[in-house]
Amino acid sequence: MLNLKSVAGALVATAMSFAPALAQNVTVVTPYLAQPGTQMFVEGFKAEAEGMGWNANIVDTAGDVAAVISRIEDAVTQNVDAIVINVDPEQIAAGLEVAKEAGIPVIGMDSGASPLLQANVTSNGYAMAAETSVYVANRIAGKGRVVMFVFDPFPPVQIRGVIADAVFGNFPDIEVIDRITPDVQDGGIADSRAKMEAILAANPEPGSISAVWAAWDQPGLGALQAIEAAGREGEGIVIVGIDANPQARDAIAAGGNFEASVAQDFVGIGKATAGVVSRAIKGEEIKEDVVYVPTVLITTANVGE
Amino acid sequence: MIRTLKLYGTLIGFVTILVFFSVQLPDTFLTARNLLNITQQVSMLAVVACSMTLVMVMGDFDLSVGSMASLAGIVAALLFSMGYPISVGIAAALLVGVLGGVFNGILVSFFGILPFVATLGTLTMFSGMAFFTSGGKTIFGRDIPTEFSGFARSGLELDQIGLIGLKLPYLSLVALLVLVVVWFILEQTIFGRRLYAIGGNQEAARLAGLKVRTLRLCAFAMTGFGAAIAGLMYASRVASANPTQGSGLMLDAIAAVFLGMTMSEEGEPRVLYSLIGVLILGILDNGLTQMSVDSYIREILVGAIIVTAVAFSSITKQSR
């Protein structure tokens, strides 16, 4: 009997010595895995997680936000090393509080900031607006009349307008002739087109409008339609947008007035999220509440890549 | 032997799942905290499944419960955002639930439209109303009073019974209350027995002098009421309201009632068995997440278990 015990003990000891270092468990919870952007976040995250030898559990709740809370509770019960979310933190605060109580770090992957998160990893809206407004200022050699399309009611878009205001304001010869908030009920293209048609009618002189700066792609596309419909595409009006959606990329590739937009690096956001998770797991206190991932200016030079 | 399997197959499956997770997750599954979590996680589904049982005992369906849950959440949140007190928002949402249920009942019992078709139509209508009234947006943030969202985050302290630091969530309590009420209605009242009589043979029930139309109408109204309760619970849990957020509840609720039906001798829905169905679904989600099983595999498994249970039950029925 005694013998048996010691044999068992030896066996256990041998097994333990061969066991690999305990892998970290990280759970990613999102209701939006069906969306292309989220898939790219997750792709980037998984690639990094594999490199670090983590067990990454990707949980998709198929649009169900309450289920995100439930799955966070489960991950906390399971005592994972970290949790990553891709959903508005305000709606899942109930789950985030449970994680905080258990001392498990939660990192947002383009989720919006919240004091319940260690950090949120996303693109810098300020920097994106700076890219396109400076592009416009340089293209028109710091001189001319500019139309702005903004949307101040939506905070992530509002900050873009603030930066463009500052950039254009810094050029004494740039005049912002209109600052338009389009109706976005129909997606923003149709109403922006109508607004742009009115501006073109009010400024009939060729060259009286130098550029259109749009806080996101749709108003820029609407303005492009208005300019083309008015037969004024030859005046060299420069249009820029932000987000680089497929329609904007097509317009840029076509080589017309729509010259530039800014693309977020979705895969990069996923990778950077893994980087923040790794820091949080090591117990580092993450001071920056928001971690920004660089964006890419898309022009005819790189739109095909 | 076959009879035992038929009656207890699903129950055996349920116990097997419990044992499986207890073995696989020895440190975390059978803990008071996790079990309390599960009761909270399934609370909304439990309320919808219990109210769904009311119409399913008559052999009817209500496919509109999910969109009714969304609509109720939106109605309450809109009123909150307009500055009305919480009680008004909740009362209005519940009223919308009853009215929607009555409307379903009228279509089914007075116009004689098949419940599947009638409630498929109202599913779309309620969903459209939720989108229209909210403008398609999620209502959240300052519009939702903290007392309302706080409800889903609090519960009865359990320190006195030795579970230090744990709470019995209020959402679980609401679900328990609905369960008791539905159980009482179905099992302890004449009204409930009449609903079962309609399910047994509607024509015979009518000939026996039952007011079949009124009874069906009442049952549908109660189901709508239950769906609205679930919608409010959901909105409280996510501190927001979105025009699609309840849509996942309908199919899960029907699945839970079906799972429950495999356990009853006559193949009838019974509310306590529906609860077992709900628990099977909820525990699978909870345990498989903890075991890090891929969410899509989880869905396949859950579907397969439902099909297996129902298939098993109908095969054993035929061989009787």
Image (cartoon, coloured by chain):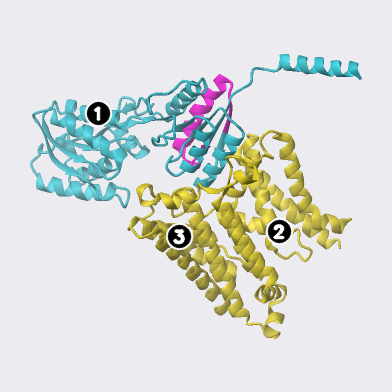
Chain colours: A cyan, B yellow
Camera-near label (3 vs 2) is 2
User: Which range of residues does the magenta coloring cover?
Assistant: A29-57
Give amino acid for label 3.
Leu
| Depth check, front residue: B168 or A270 | B168
Q: Would you identify the image quadrant in which residue B81 lies? A: bottom left
The residue to which callout 1 is attached is A130
The 10 Å Cα crowd at callout 1, few under 14, some 14 to 19, many 20 or more, is many
Is residue A43 within the magenta segment?
A: yes
Q: Is residue B67 magenta?
A: no
Q: Secondary structure at mark 2?
A: helix
Query: Do labels 3 and 2 touch, CB within 8 Å?
Result: no
**Image check: B309 left or right of A238?**
right
Tell me the CA gap for discs 1 and 2.
61 Å
- The amino acid on which the numbered mark 2 sits, given as a three-letter code, is Tyr
- Residue that sits furthest to the front in the current view: B160
Q: Chain of mark 1?
A: A
Which type of secondary structure does the marked residue at label 3 adopt? Answer: helix
Q: Nearer the viewer, residue B33 or A125?
A: B33
B53 shown above or below A276: below
Query: Which chain does tag 2 point to?
Result: B
The circle on residue B273 is 2
Q: Nearer the viewer, residue B218 or B174?
A: B174
Q: Nearer the viewer, mark 1 or mark 3?
A: 3
Q: Does residue A305 show up?
A: yes
Chain bearing tag 3 is: B
> Residue B190 location in percent, x, y?
68, 76
| Disc 1 and disc 3 in contact, CB within 8 angstroms | no
The structure residue drawn at horizontal position 63% and vertical position 58%, both measured from the top left corner, is B254
Say the numbered circle drawn on residue B71: 3
Against A216, residue A51 (above or below) is above
